[in-house]
Image: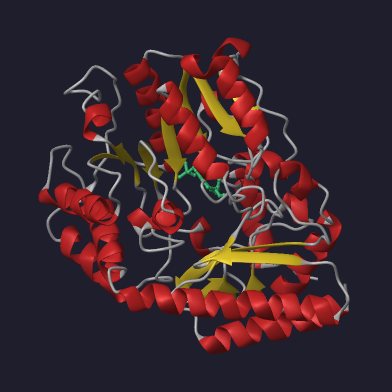
Amino acid sequence: MAISKSTALFNAAKALIPGGVNSPVRACGSVGGQPIFIERGDKSRLYDVDGNAYIDYVLSWGPLILGHRPPEVIKALEHVLGIGTSFGAPTALETQLAQLVVDRVPSVDMIRMVNSGTEATMSAVRLARGYTGRDIIIKFDGCYHGHADTLLVAAGSGVATLGIPGSPGIPDAVISNTYSLPYNDIKGFEKLMAQKGDRVAGVIVEPIAGNMGMVCPKEGFLESLRKMTTQHGSVLIFDEVMTGFRVSKGSAQGYFKITPDLSCFGKVIGGGLPVGAYGGRKEIMDQIAPVGSVYQAGTLSGNPLAMAAGIATLTTLQDDTVYAELDRKTDRLVKGLQAAADDAGIAFKTCHVGSMAGFFFTDREVYNFEDAKTCDLDRFSRFYQGMLARGVYLAPSQFEACFVSSAHTDTDIDTTIEAAVSVMAAL
Ligand code: KE4
């Protein structure tokens, strides 16, 4: 039997690229599959090289909140292509995107553009250390903040998916000042801050965790982080790379009404092009070179093509009805999946905030990474494969979240729920 074009392409890629992929979680190993190679995307659909179409709930891991090739973004990119691709010198586009973020996020007075979420969190941590003169960073198990050395401790996403305890290549000395606690462990956090708070430079958290599956903060968790960091003069960093402009118009900090000192962004603010950013109070951001002495730089930071895509995306998101529709469709999806599982008698938990959604095959509440790891991962894999076979493209890992775009139609949601009913019945 002839092999598929995806398999042939995967075999060729594996000879040149580790695992045949440029990011580990795309390898689909944990769900017993191999990656499908994509030919093109359009609206809510992905089309693979073998002519199959899929309703896409990965959306490039979050950036494509308007779906594939939204006209506003394509038009903005075509305009920039007429004037260049990169200058290594400032353009008005960078100020325009900065203004859109500052207008939408009251805690951000100033912002610096970088090229990825990893760069954003790595820089924010360095800034917190430079601003406070302290070394200790606190994070939470199962949260993933990109692959900077300091933060690859008990990380989620691909690290959890592959079951890698940490990562070789990171000297103990580098992570000796990184403490990781269970997510939602208010008592443990307050105890650690009581012991070491005056040496804590920063506390970094996903305000809604999306890298151990989707896990919401318990009542009082974020409030405790805010109270204790204020009390001890530590910097509270919200990693909103995934939640930023996704879970609500005001991001997670607007949704929960908690004001961090620094925020990290990515994904949606690039509209599908490489953009990360970190920002916050002016007195902290003024420590960044060239104004201050905390160094951070980047050849393609603020790249005009990426800025144009981000501006077009955030401008389109200024319309409140976009968020209302995203929430309505995601709520329908999540309720439909839950009903399908209930009808099939399958232990299943779902949640969503705005158009970020998650589900676990379990009958217990999931409050942290340990809970998430007790879920039925084998059932997840079979569910993933069954949905893929029925044209629904989910994240190939239990330790990820799913996303809905403004391009998803009610028919897409209905089709997805019908597929889930069929797959759940056979699980
Ligand atoms: P990037 O360096 O991948 O742009 O962003 C790192 C990052 C930081 N913070 C949060 C909350 C994140 O979710 C991420 C990256 N997310 C993963 C998916 N969960 C990216 C997908 C991948 O690694 O291929």
- Res. 114 in view: no
For residue 276, above or below residue 227: below
Tell which of 37 and 237 is nearer to you: 237
Circle count: 0
Any part of residue 387 in sight: yes
Q: Is residue 126 left or right of residue 109?
A: right
Q: Residue at x 25, y 30 (%)?
A: 285
Q: Nearer the viewer, residue 92 or 182?
A: 182
Residue 246: % across, % down: 44, 61
Q: Residue at x 79, y 60 (%)?
A: 381
Classify 195 as above or below 236. Answer: above
x and y percentages locating residue 192 in the rendered image: 61, 22
Q: Quadrant of the N terminus?
A: bottom right
Residue drawn at x 80%, y 62% is: 361
Residue 347, relative to residue 364: is it above or below? below
Q: Position of residue 290 (x, y in %)?
A: 17, 23
Front position in the image: 56 or 151: 151
Quadrant where the C terminus lies?
Answer: bottom right
Residue 138's image quarter? Answer: top right
Please, which colouring scheme is shown? Answer: secondary structure
